[in-house]
Amino acid sequence: MMLVLSLNTSHASIDDEAYSQMACIKPNTELEFDHVGCLNKKGVAIVGDNLQTVFGDFPYPMGLVDASGKLILPNQYHQIYMPSDWGYDNSLPMSDALILVETRDLSQDSLFGNLGVVSDGWGLVDTKGNFIIPIGMYDEINQFYDNGLAAVEVDGKYGFINTKGELVIPLMYDYAFGFSDGLAGVKYQGLYGVIDVNNRAVIDFKHQHLELLKPNLVAVKDGDRYALMDIHSTRLTGYDYDLISDLDFQGLYLVEQSNKYGVINTKGEIVVPVMYDSVDINYEKSSYHDNKTYLSAKRADGNYDLYDEQGVLVND
């Protein structure tokens, strides 16, 4: 059951020890809103009046209050992404200083009804509600990942800003993924490569597509197939696979070949043969047995084989 407490404080942030012990701390505000969200660690919460939809009630549009309950951003924004320190709500790892706000074109009927004409736009505000980047300066602003950089876009060209809102990598790319471990995949003149935070090419722009994998490996596409490559451009496999993707984010990768699936490791070695209808982590077995990762591989007959992370078949 979630613990909900009321906090009446003028401080901008919440004490670490108190925060770690609470499931949800809400500001004590005299403002009348249907929805008052939990404060994040910087002492900011989302507020709004609920709007009824076929999927239930949603706060829409939204604003922000601080820990004292003061309205710091009026409830006129249609999406707010802000840093969250709750373990179950950390899918948007942003800078702890900046909050991403969005307005949308609501001139047409939508899930939320016809709410009037509002131009699409993105902006960044700080925890006091001050705009660091005004609405409309960029056509798109993505979340801040590690290294404190976020991809931005204007007229189809992408670059990166820092947490001060400064453009530190120019708007020169056809597309840009977020940074991970100091690297980002980008598209330049129709081909993909990898850059570092100083905008230096780590992997040259000569691939039809790529995806950064953990830890510091890359799935690169040439023709119709993918290969596994390290950041020094050394290929660890041939262009053998229709798909390579992270499986456990620690060095196991799901691969697909002619609609059959298997698993390879960081050396490109086959851990699970590419002969199964599906392969997934067996979380129950992995959680309670030997501190290892176990993989369930579905055979064509509907039964499963169980492998450990070394590729040993461990069926009982």
Image (tube, grey):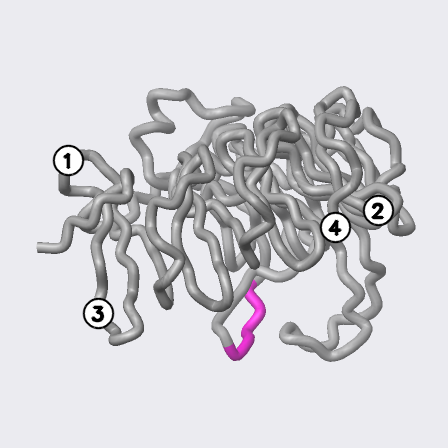
C-alpha span from label 4 to label 1: 41 Å
Q: Is residue 100 above or below residue 232?
A: below
Whichever of labels 1 and 2 marks the residue nearer the N terminus, that label is 2
Residue 203 percent coordinates (x, y): 72, 31
Q: Is residue 261 above or below residue 160?
A: below
Q: Classify residue 307 as left or right of residue 270.
A: left
Question: Does the segment drawn in magenta span residue 192?
Answer: no
According to the image, label 1 marks what residue? Answer: 290
C-alpha span from label 3 to label 4: 37 Å
Q: Which mark is residue 174?
A: 2
Three-letter residue code for mark 3: Asn
C-alpha span from label 3 to label 2: 45 Å
In-front residue for pair 213/175: 213
Which type of secondary structure does the marked residue at label 1 adopt? loop
Whichever of labels 2 and 4 marks the residue nearer the N terminus, that label is 2
The region drawn magenta spans: 50-54
Label 3 close to label 4 by CB (< 8 Å): no
C-alpha span from label 2 to label 4: 13 Å
Q: Residue furthest front?
A: 238
- Residue at the image position 49 percent from the left and 61 percent from the top: 257
The dominant secondary structure in magenta is: strand
According to the image, label 4 marks what residue? Answer: 208
Which type of secondary structure does the marked residue at label 4 adopt? loop
Three-letter residue code for mark 1: Asp
Determine crowd level at label 2: few under 14, some 14-19, many 20+ residues with C-alpha closer than 10 A: some
According to the image, label 3 marks what residue? Answer: 303
- Residue at the image position 81 percent from the left and 52 percent from the top: 121
